[in-house]
């Protein structure tokens, strides 16, 4: 049975409370990690013992406490759409054999040019292969973890949280008092978008499926639409800003729900096109935008610590909290990915690499 956002099944609670099976301890030069040597479904993932990564001059080595499962990692795992292979991630197999982007943990080593962190600092952000005991990360893609935020919450926050923040503020130019519609409000980016929009003074309507309505209400949405029963574009309500997160709705339909001079921000897209993904719909929106009063746009999230620090301020204040569907041990990462593939989670799944109280290397 599915759990709600901040609940966990007995099996997932056990993963969070007990050491992850397979963690290496004998050889300090090696570590346990999830690896893949080909593109494919979650079945290509396996737990293995590999060499511990070496830090570059502007990188830090993070002792990973937890990692997050996000849609971007799924795309890199599957190699879909094919466009991502052409832009440098590997034509026939992934160049990065250890998947995982979202990370939270403790700095244990720094490169020669690192000035922002020191060993012992607790951080969160985006790493190079976070489904592992240790991962390297550019110092520019990490921020200090708020003291009152647990590692598992921090670990699922960076990728989705900064995407939602940029979509609302830097791209959507949200102003207090505006009406915001969040399509995909129960997902990773969506749960952050709902909370951030509320924190910024908006009136928020979230769109989600029947089983996820209560979650969207619980994180602060003023109104919730069940897309299986109601049409957000029926003309009864119009919105100043729409965030379409991973959607498939036609541009014309989205425009019907916008105010005459409203803004549409397309955040990703899963239109089933194996070659370009949602890029076609995004391109059509931008091509149409100069000819209409409404602003139709999209963006690629910028992975920089400045956005993570802004997000950390919201999280540290308690205005925004990560929504965790379930927690999994490192060895069970493939199952966490399958759940995301099948749309069975709300919020984001967390991979607990080093449970609370577990010493390094144990």
Image (cartoon, rainbow, N blue to C red):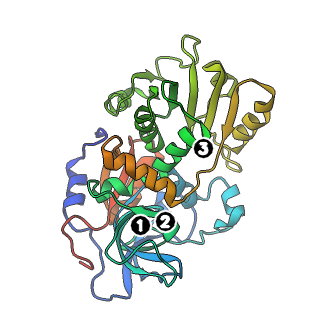
Q: Which residue is mark 3?
A: 268
Label 2 SS: loop
> Does residue 2 appear anywhere in the picture?
yes
Q: Which residue is mark 2?
A: 99
The disc, 3 or 1, on the residue closer to the chain's N-terminal end is 1
C-alpha separation, residue under disc 2 versus residue under disc 3:
20 Å
Q: Is residue 13 left or right of residue 324?
A: left
The disc, 2 or 3, on the residue closer to the chain's N-terminal end is 2
Q: Which residue is mark 1?
A: 131
Q: Position of residue 61 (x, y in %)?
A: 42, 77
C-alpha separation, residue under disc 2 versus residue under disc 1:
6 Å
Locate the N terminus by quadrant: top left
The residue positioned 35% from the left and 56% from the top of the image is 154
Crowding at dot 1, Cα within 10 Å, few <14 / some 14-19 / many 20+, comes out as: many
Crowding at dot 3, Cα within 10 Å, few <14 / some 14-19 / many 20+, comes out as: many
Locate the C terminus by quadrant: bottom left
The residue positioned 44% from the left and 44% from the top of the image is 188
Closer to the camera in the image, 344 or 27:
27
């Amino acid at each position: 049975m599915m759990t709600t956002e901040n609940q966990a099944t007995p099996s997932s609670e056990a993963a969070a409370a007990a050491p992850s099976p397979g963690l290496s301890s004998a050889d300090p030069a090696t570590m346990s990690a999830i690896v893949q040597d080909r593109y494919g479904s979650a079945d290509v993932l396996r737990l293995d013992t590999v060499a511990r990564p070496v830090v570059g001059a502007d990188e830090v080595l993070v002792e990973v406490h937890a990692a997050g499962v996000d849609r971007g990692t799924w795309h890199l795992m599957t190699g879909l759409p094919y466009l991502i292979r052409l832009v440098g991630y590997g034509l026939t197999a992934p160049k990065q054999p250890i998947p995982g982007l979202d990370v939270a943990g403790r700095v244990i080593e720094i490169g020669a040019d690192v000035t922002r962190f020191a060993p012992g600092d607790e951080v969160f952000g985006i790493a190079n292969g976070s489904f592992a005991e240790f991962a390297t990360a550019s110092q520019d893609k990490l921020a200090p973890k708020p003291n009152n935020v647990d590692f598992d919450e921090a670990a699922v926050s960076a990728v989705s949280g900064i995407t939602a923040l940029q979509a609302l503020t830097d791209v959507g130019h949200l102003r207090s008092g505006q009406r915001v519609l969040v399509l995909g409000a129960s997902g990773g980016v969506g749960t952050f978008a709902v909370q951030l929009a509320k924190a910024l003074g908006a009136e928020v309507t979230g769109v989600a499926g029947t089983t996820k309505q209560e979650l969207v209400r619980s994180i602060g949405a003023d109104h919730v639409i069940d897309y299986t029963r109601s049409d957000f574009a029926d003309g009864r309500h119009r919105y100043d800003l729409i965030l379409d997160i991973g959607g498939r709705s036609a541009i014309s339909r989205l425009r019907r729900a916008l105010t005459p001079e409203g803004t549409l921000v397309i955040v990703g897209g899963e239109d089933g096109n194996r070659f370009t993904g949602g890029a076609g719909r995004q391109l059509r929106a931008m091509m149409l935008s100069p000819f209409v009063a409404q602003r139709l746009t999209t963006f690629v999230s910028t992975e920089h610590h400045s956005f993570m620090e802004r997000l950390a301020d919201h999280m540290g204040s308690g205005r925004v909290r990560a929504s965790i569907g379930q927690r999994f041990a490192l060895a069970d990462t493939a199952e966490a990915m399958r759940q995301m593939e099948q749309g069975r989670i709300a919020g984001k799944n967390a991979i607990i690499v080093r449970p609370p109280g577990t010493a390094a290397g144990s």
